[in-house]
Image: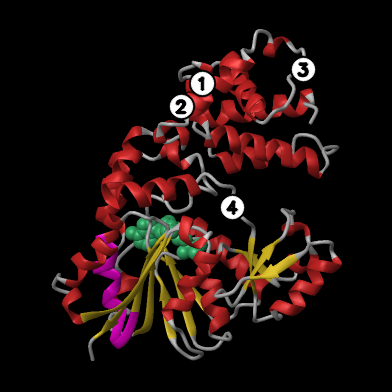
Amino acid sequence: MRLHRNLCFAVIDGLNNIFNDGEYADKVIQKLLKRDKRWGSRDRSFIAETTYDIVRWKRLYAKIADVKEPFDRDNLWRLFAVWATLKGIRLPDWKYFENTPTRKIKGRFDELSKIRKYRDSIPDWIDEVGLAELGEDLWTKEIAMQNVLADVILRVNTLKTTKKELQQRLQSEDIETEFLDGYPSALKLKERANVFKTTAFKDGWFEVQDASSQLVAEFLNVEPGMKVVDTCAGAGGKTLHIAALMQNKGQVIAMDIYESKLRKLKTRAKRNGVHNFDMRVLDSTKPIKKLYDKADRVLIDAPCSGLGVLRRNPDAKWKLEPEFLDRIRVTQQDVLQKYSRMVKPGGKLVYATCSVLPSENQEQVDKFLTSEFGKDFTFVKDNKVLAHQSGFDGFYMALLEKKK
Ligand SMILES: C[S@@+](CC[C@H](N)C(=O)[O-])C[C@H]1O[C@@H](n2cnc3c(N)ncnc32)[C@H](O)[C@@H]1O
């Protein structure tokens, strides 16, 4: 592979925004890709993948390059040189790469690869929490998998088409996919492609949604005609799935504390042909109280550390803080206590997160079940999805039933 100067500059600028200005990697990359209209799909992939790679391996590369934060531009070029060297890419004779110690880089890599926090490039505190909660064996395998680039998975919108029809239509746009056993609505891309450009996407035939995430709406066991509340709906990935499983019959009420997220859901719902939904911004307790004992199903897709989806959001490793984790655990119990009251007797509740930590998952459910409101519920089943076992995102989901 030959390195092109303007693409490398774009990567360095992006890293500067992410590491030094605290911007989110996905937003930075979106912005970078708009910089030059002449860039083709290969150029765009180079920028996105290289930036994500260096974000993912920040701690390891910084240790190898012997640079410390805050990184100045020379330091960012040194990180880049480590990335290129380890990829076996020949460095051009640009001034930024003068005196790059290629042999030393490889030697340091071999040496540091023996230590998990460097090998898997994670902050000490995350390594300690993961180890304490999952144990040596599971944590070592899980954090390694969280550094492997995630596949692109689609969820077919069964309100508009079938999996087979979608597969054929994508094929006509040169995108090859395959079915996944155990995931009834999923199609996996055989090669990465920009699916958002396809006419099938514009027509609302699919959404991009990881296979593990697709298990959540299935777990809720909805039926057409039910009243379902999606309490932490965000931009509605799971709301849309629920609506499709309900065949647009009945009512899905999507709630979130952020109106901006629900507005995105509205746009997506229109594209998906979803009609059976309402939205409520949670700026008071009123929308919740009005629904006490009324819902057949309640989904709590709780805010969490995101430690199950680092493959997609590698910069979360560097942005997460122990205090945030403490605060989010409090919020998780709080939303369980409050939103569970909307479930009607005999109705069902799913509590889900995209974390792999038991303290955000089964321990929250256990605590809830022994609390005053939780005593009205019985535990039906749960699914602890680890990325290294499933091949998809790390997730947790528990199904509870309210006593009659
Ligand atoms: C895991 S995300 C939801 C993802 C979404 N369900 C999906 O499938 O695309 C958690 C959501 O909870 C929202 N949230 C945070 N605190 C909340 C609260 N106290 N009540 C309701 N929603 C909350 C966040 O704004 C965020 O959108």
Q: Secondary structure at mark 4?
A: loop
Q: Main secondary structure of the magenta part?
A: helix
N-terminal of the pair, mark 2 or mark 4, is 2
Contact between labelled residues 3 and 4, with CB atoms less than 8 Å apart: no
Type of the residue with mark 3: Pro
- Residue range in magenta is 333-348
Q: Which residue is mark 3?
A: 92
N-terminal of the pair, mark 4 or mark 1, is 1
Q: Which residue is mark 4?
A: 150
The image shows residue 256 at horizontal and vertical percentages of 42, 63
Residue 402: image quadrant is bottom left
User: Of circles 2 and 3, which is in front?
Assistant: 2
Contact between labelled residues 2 and 1, with CB atoms less than 8 Å apart: yes
Q: Which residue is mark 2?
A: 112
The image shows residue 59 at horizontal and vertical percentages of 47, 28
Q: Residue at x 53, y 59 (%)?
A: 391
Real-space Cα separation, disc 4 to disc 1, in angstroms: 27 Å
Q: Quadrant of the C terminus?
A: bottom left
